[in-house]
Image (spheres, grey):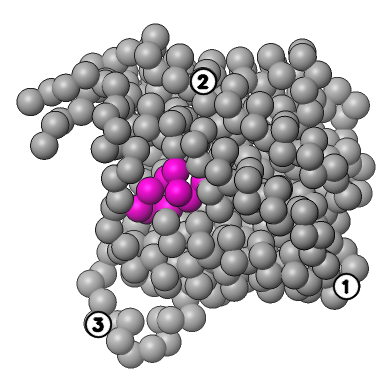
Amino acid sequence: MSSPILPRPRHLVAFGPHGGAHTVAVRAGISMAVPLIVLWLTDHLDLSLYAAFGAFTALYGRNHSHLPRLRMQSLAAAILVSAVVIGTTVGTFEAREWIVVPVVAAVAALVTIISDAADLHPPGALFATFAVAACASVPSTPGSIGLALAVSLASAALSLAIGVIGFAHPSARLRPRSTFSISFRDAIARPERVSTIARLVAGILIAGLVPTLAGIGHPYWAMVAVVAALSGPDATARLVRAGHRILGTVVGLGLAALIFAIDLPTAATIAVVVALQMTAELFIGRNYGLTMVFVTPLALCMIELAHAVDGGALIADRFVETLFGAVIGIALTLLWRSRSSTIVDA
């Protein structure tokens, strides 16, 4: 029977299956660790943001066998590297804080269509919009665009290589074969998909423009939060994700405060970033709120690696903007209803 769209407490604390998450966590950890260590040893940690987004390639296709995963990750790599280049290009403009908002909205709409057509996993435009918005927030020069392309591309290529290493083992050939294909048929023709994209664009514009007008630092966190909140397959799932985003961020900010208080050396910070990335991957398929406990300090530590920051101000901005973005997601979910706004109560 159908039930109201408002989630029940059990939806917030429900856990999905483990699903072999440890192998994905190892791939993600290595994909993140190697570029960061190389940049650290060559004294180029200021480029670590570009490397991190390239390394997100490893997060795609976790349930696919090796060759279909390679094809899916290749598409994801193209999306992520393009997002880094777009964001860095926006960062060359003086009015980047205004330009980035419609650019992120456009990228989110396009990547959502591509994600639907290719049935990407994880689905949606969260990582791409995060890459565009974060890279655009850093003042850049035309020369930075080439560096961003090279670093993100190299990092993504490493992730692709790591993803297929296991295929050399004989047991890999005994695994059930999965498939990967791309079809744009009905990707935007269905009314509910048009509504989903329109709601997403509206949410990004609101979440980006209001903090920018108010002069709050790091307004891209609000845009990322609203994309995360609106990425669920139905209204109940979107409300659950918004709740997870808020609660997980609050706890994660406490963990971030502890990490900042220790004042770790660079090598230790890199180790913490890799550990947080791996831990997040262990839980992303099980409970999004718990995942955010680790993703939140991960994001803040990445910023600290690339640039000197005021940890207290960073934590305050993250809280305010995540809360604002999630609330916008909740409001749009409740006000912008469709026929898919119910769940089946088992």
233 horizontally vs 59: left or right: left
Where, by quadrant of the figure, is residue 335 drawn? top left
* Mark toward the start of the polypeptide (2 vs 1): 1
Residue drawn at point x = 54 percent, y = 75 percent? 162
Q: Is residue 15 left or right of residue 230?
A: left
The nearer-to-camera label among 3 and 2 is: 2
Quarter of the figure with the C terminus: top left
Nearer the observer, 255 or 202:
255
Task: Residue lying at the far left in this picture: please name it.
Answer: 1
Quarter of the picture containing the N terminus is top left
Please say whether residue 184 is visible from this viewpoint: no
Report the residue at 77% width, 14% height from top: 214
Q: Sequence order check: which comes first, mark 3 or mark 2?
A: 3
Query: Can you say whether 294 is above or below 270 in the image?
Result: above
Q: Which mark is residue 42?
A: 1
Q: What amino acid is at disc 2?
A: Val
Query: Is-magenta flag for residue 287?
Result: yes
Magenta stretch: give its range: 284-292
Labelled disc at residue 287: none
Find the distance from the CA under tag 1 to the CA under tag 3: 41 Å
Q: CA distance from mark 2 to mark 1?
A: 42 Å
x, y (%) of residue 143?
A: 91, 49
Residue 39: x and y in percent read: 81, 68
Tell me the residue that label 3 is attached to.
174
Question: What type is the residue that disc 1 sits on?
Answer: Thr
> Residue 281, position in %: x, y?
47, 59
Q: Amino acid at mark 3?
A: Leu
Q: Secondary structure at mark 1?
A: loop
Q: How many marks?
A: 3
Q: Residue 257: x, y in percent? A: 70, 48
Residue 327 badge: 2
Tag 3 near tag 2, CB within 8 Å? no
